[in-house]
Amino acid sequence: MGEILVLVDHAGGRIRKPALELLTLARRLGTPAAVVLGAGESAAAIAATAGEYGAAKVYVADASEFADYLVVPKVDALAQIAQAASPAAVLVTSTGEGKEVAARLALRMGSGLITDAVDVAPGDAGPVAAQSVFAASYTVTSTVTRGIPVITVKPNATGSEAAPAAGQVEQVTVAFSEAAAGTRVVSRTPRASSGRPELTDAEIVVSGGRGVAGPGGFSVVEELADALDAAVGASRAAVDAGWYPHTNQVGQTGKQVSPQLYIANGISGAIQHRAGMQTSKTIVAVNKDPEAPIFDLVDYGLVGDLFEVLPQLTAEVKAR
Ligand code: FAD
C-alpha cells in the first residue's frame, strides 16, 4: 500500500498518544505521512516526534483559520493534501471532533467512511477495518469500496512504538473554503485538570459504581487510580446520583474506553456499561456479589467489599 495520511491530534505542544498509535498502525498499512495542523511554534517539535514514530513525510499547515474556526479548515487541509498525494487511506482518531472531520472529509472526497475501528489490517482491496459492535458482542470487519478510505480508530485500540524514519517535512499552504467561515470560535476555556490521564487515552482506568455508596466513597477509587497513574471512570448510576462528573462516565451514553487494564469497582456490569469498556485488554472487577454479571466478562474477579479490597490493592501497588 502507498502513503497513509494520519491526522495528528496534538495539545499543549505535544502529540496526543492516540495519534502516536495511528502512526504505528499506519506503518503496518503502508508509508505513514503525518498531517500537523495549527501547531504554531510547536510544529517543528511535533513534526520531529511524528518522524520518531515512523512518519516518512510530515505535512505542516499553520494558517490562523485552524484556531479561528471549528473543524472545516482541517477538512479543507486534509482534502487538499489527499488530492495531491492520493494516499491509500486517511486515519483519524475517533474523538468527537475526529469523527466530524472524517465524516466531512469522506463526503467531500466522495469516499467511504468507517468509524470507531479497533484495528485496521492491510487487505488485497485496501485496508480492512475491525469494529466492535452491539456492546462488543460482535466484531465486524469491513473495507471501503469507493474512493480514498477514511477510517477513524479508537484510542488505545493499538499500541504505539517508536520507529525512527526520515521525517521529511513539507510546508503546505491551504486554500480555505467559504464553509470554514460558517462557525467562528468565540473562546476556549480548558477544563480544570485533575492531573490524571485523559479517560479515553489512559492505559489504565479505575472505575466506581453505585457500590461506592456516595461521593466520599470515590476516594478509595481515586487513591488506587493515583497509585497506578490511571484515569478514574464512573458508572451512570454513580454519575446520575451526582457522585462523579458526567465527563467521567463510561458506557453507551458516556465515553468508550479501551485501556490495557480496566478495574470496575462496585459496578454490576449492565450492558450499557459494558458497551463502553468491553474492549479493554484486561478486565478486573471487585464486587461483593459473586453473582454480579460483571464477573461473566472479567479476566480476574475479586469477590469482596471494595472498601476493604481497594486500600489493600493500593498499599500493595505503592509498596512495589
Ligand atoms: P448497580 O447496577 O446498582 O450495581 C452496583 C454494584 O455494586 C452491585 O453489583 C453490588 O453488588 C455492588 N456493590 C455494592 N456495594 C459494594 C461494596 N461495598 N463492595 C463491592 N461491591 C459492591 N450505565 C453506565 O454505566 N454507563 C452508561 O453509559 C449507561 N448508559 C445507559 C443508557 C440507557 C439508555 C440506559 C437505559 C441505561 C444506561 N446505563 C448506563 C445504566 C445501566 O443500565 C445501569 O443502570 C448502570 O450501569 C448501573 O450502574 P452500577 O453498576 O454502578 O449500579
Image: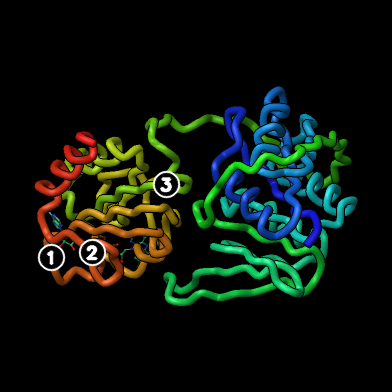
Query: At which x and y percent is residue 96?
Result: 57, 51
Work out which quarter of the rendered image holds the C terminus and state it: top left
Q: Is residue 318 visible?
A: yes
Q: CA distance from mark 2 to mark 3?
A: 22 Å
* Numbered circle sitting on residue 203: 3
Query: CB under 8 Å between callouts 1 and 2?
Result: yes
Left or right: 32, with 231 as reference point: right
Ligand 1 neighbours mark 2 (CB distance < 8 Å):
yes
* Secondary structure of residue under mark 3: loop
Looking at the picture, the colour scheme in use is rainbow
**Disc 2 residue type (three-letter):** Ser
Q: Quadrant of ligand 1?
A: bottom left
Name the one closer to the observer, 95 or 160: 160
Left or right: 152, with 293 as reference point: right
Left or right: 216, with 234 as reference point: left
**Disc 3 residue type (three-letter):** Glu
Ligand 1 neighbours mark 1 (CB distance < 8 Å):
yes
Q: CA distance from mark 3 to mark 1?
A: 27 Å
Query: At which x and y percent is residue 302?
Result: 17, 59
Mark 1 is surrounded, within 10 Å at the Cα level, by few (under 14), some (14 to 19) or many (20 or more) other residues, namely: some
Residue occupying the point 13% across, 68% down: 290
Residue position for label 1 = 289
